[in-house]
Image (spheres, grey):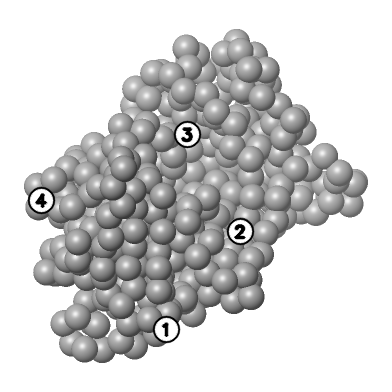
Amino acid sequence: MKTQVCIIGGGPSGLMLSQLLHRKGIDTIVLERQSREYVLGRIRAGVLEHGFAALMREAQCGERMDREGEIHDGFIIAHDGKMDRVDLHKYSGGSSVVVYGQTELTRDLYEARDRMKGIVIHNAEDVQPHDLKSANPYVTYRSGDEVVRIDCDFVIGADGFHGVSRKSIPRDVLKEYEKVYPFGWLGVLSRTKPVSPELIYAKHERGFALCSLRSQVLSRYYIQVPLTDNVEDWSDDAFWAELKRRLPAEVAAQLITGASIEKSIAPLRSFVAEPMRYGNLFLAGDAAHIVPPTGARGLNSAASDIYYLYHAMVAHYKDGDSTGLDKYSEKALARVWKAQRFSWWMTTMLHTFPDSIAYDQKLQDTDLAYLFSSEKALGSLAENYVGLPF
């Protein structure tokens, strides 16, 4: 097989890049290790920055998002018995976020690729990039007993943290930065009316909690748990009881509980790999960087990678200008590190750390007190939350 751009990874990042490039007449093939049903079964983030929403519209995939997604102009931080609202619209200069589940977003992208007869190959096993430093890279994968070769100009590694793409960069070239947090998030999805029309981030001495939503009939809740906990340790009743303890009394009283549709524990970590380009391989999304979910930057950081790659590829193929490709790693990493900083700050300010001392706790309290005493501090939070410019 032959294509211009071979994309490893059929999640939202890979699908979006494929869709955007296809609309500009640039051929792509997407390889995904799992089945479509498996990919659509992943429960992930649901807060999209305005730049991501704009990319979905440019890819002609935003119709259902605009119809069913919810525009949020703010969120609430509960702390010290108070509920302070962050007015995103006011403090970001008129921007907002869209609450729309990643599963639905991925489904929209798959349907768009189907309509355009885009090539997305599922259950591709043993995917391996080759000759990445040459002008003629290629990718192989196994389909049953057959090994298939795809010749291409460029390889995009959008195959996540555990994928093969980053591992294809030699160890003496790749530099990795990582911070592992001493806790995880236990998340529950339930077919219940959300307790609040806006997200509630709750700082509590028992641990952090988050009230989120996917729609007006689908709620997503999280509580901070030790890394030693397992999903089996938490019955639905135990989860709801602990969540109520960490929420303000008036919120807990309104909480509608129900059977969990999905329950999982996600450990929190920060991770960045540099560079994001090696020869004709370009990393994007979780293959190159991960953030704690506290600041809703994960999927949105991937979107900026796709934005830069999309425009760089179009300039290369349409105008013969490779400047964007040459500067991709530097440009993408500059924004990635800003997202890392913001996610680290939100995580540090709102979570209970098992090894913290009284001094640390006082700093957390002071950080929150300063935040809500300063319009400039609120402006900085809002600017980062709705998404920095690409």
Tag nearer the camera, 3 or 2: 2
Q: Quadrant of the C terminus?
A: bottom left
Q: Which residue is mark 2?
A: 271
Q: Which mark is residue 212?
A: 3
**Residues marked 1 and 3 touching at CB (< 8 Å):** no
Of the residues shown, which amino acid type is indicated by label 2?
Phe
| SS for dot 4 | loop
- Characterize the local packing of mark 3: few (<14), some (14-19) or many (20 or more) Cα atoms within 10 angstroms: many
**Residues marked 3 and 2 touching at CB (< 8 Å):** no
Q: Earlier in the sequence, mark 1 or mark 2?
A: 2
Would residue 115 be found to the left or right of residue 131 on screen?
A: left
Give the distance between the C-alpha atoms of the residues marked 1 and 4, in whole angstroms: 31 Å
Q: Earlier in the sequence, mark 3 or mark 2?
A: 3
Q: Residue at x 56, y 24 (%)?
A: 251
Comparing 142 with 56, the one in front is 142
**In the rendered image, is residue 172 in sight?**
yes
Q: Earlier in the sequence, mark 1 or mark 4?
A: 4
Q: Position of residue 330 (x, y in %)?
A: 49, 80
Give the distance between the C-alpha atoms of the residues marked 4 and 2, in whole angstroms: 35 Å
Q: Which residue is mark 1?
A: 327
Q: Which residue is mark 4?
A: 117
Q: Position of residue 161 (x, y in %)?
A: 52, 52
Give the distance between the C-alpha atoms of the residues marked 1 and 3, in whole angstroms: 37 Å
Q: Residue at x 19, y 61 (%)?
A: 1
Pick out the residue farthest to the right. 358
| SS for dot 3 | strand
